[in-house]
Image (cartoon, helix red, strand yellow):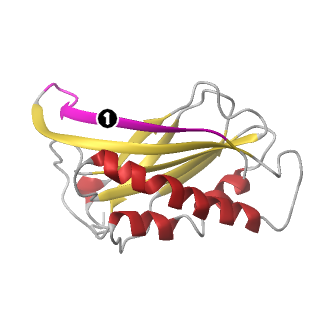
């Protein structure tokens, strides 16, 4: 695995979009910029990327949880693949081995980890989805953390993002589901 750099991003939200104060909500993203070994090539067997995702989860999630300072109640993951790669490369990094170290770092997690992957040029942002770690239908915890790295991904790179949060959206006013129309 060829890691160009890692980044930890911490944000604390103290007010909603209207400026109304709320209990502080902290979100932390752990980001790794790695070389994409399959950039420019169609490959059937993407399992080396599965392993890279698992290794990066073990390396970075503990730091993200430590930086959070409190208990993680929400989590999410995302990947941005450079333009010489394929969206499947991002999917291979965030599935199927990244979830286990993410859950280990937060001490559990029964719900599916929300995820997102896309192909993009350096500096593109990704909305990293967040959801409650145990209650998949907790609408108050459906959220995003927008993440970007100014100089990544280069065409032959992948940006892997993992995030944890200690709360809901500020002042959530949408109940829990499932709800039908």
> Quarter of the image holding residue 170?
top left
> Quarter of the image holding residue 24?
top left
Residue drawn at (39%, 63%) of the image: 105
Residue drawn at (41%, 56%) of the image: 62
> Quarter of the image holding residue 53?
bottom right
Q: Which residue is mark 1?
A: 11
Quarter of the image that includes the C terminus: bottom left
- Range of magenta residues: 4-19
Residue drawn at (88%, 56%) of the image: 42
Q: Position of residue 20 (x, y in %)?
A: 11, 29
Q: Position of residue 160 (x, y in %)?
A: 58, 47
Asked which secondary structure carries label 1, the reply is strand
Q: Depth check: give the residue in front, 68 or 74.
A: 68
Q: Position of residue 168 (x, y in %)?
A: 23, 50
**Residue 29 appears left or right of 168:** right
Q: Is residue 173 on the magenta stretch?
A: no
């Amino acid at each position: 695995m060829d890691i160009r750099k890692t980044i930890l991003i911490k944000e604390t939200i103290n007010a909603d979009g209207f400026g109304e104060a709320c209990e502080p909500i902290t979100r932390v993203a752990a980001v790794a910029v790695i070389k994409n070994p399959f950039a420019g090539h169609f490959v059937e067997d993407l399992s080396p990327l599965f392993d890279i995702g698992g290794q990066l989860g073990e390396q970075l999630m503990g730091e993200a949880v430590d930086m959070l300072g409190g208990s993680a109640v929400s989590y999410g993951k995302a990947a941005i693949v450079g333009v010489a790669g394929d969206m499947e490369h991002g999917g291979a990094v965030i599935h199927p081995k990244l979830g286990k170290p993410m859950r280990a770092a937060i001490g559990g997690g029964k719900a599916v980890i929300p995820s997102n992957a896309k192909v993009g040029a350096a500096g593109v942002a990704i909305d990293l989805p967040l959801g409650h770690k145990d209650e998949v239908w907790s609408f108050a915890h459906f959220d995003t953390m927008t993440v970007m790295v100014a100089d990544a991904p280069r065409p032959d790179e992948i940006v892997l993002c993992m995030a944890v949060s200690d709360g809901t959206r500020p002042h959530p006013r949408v109940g829990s589901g499932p709800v039908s129309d």
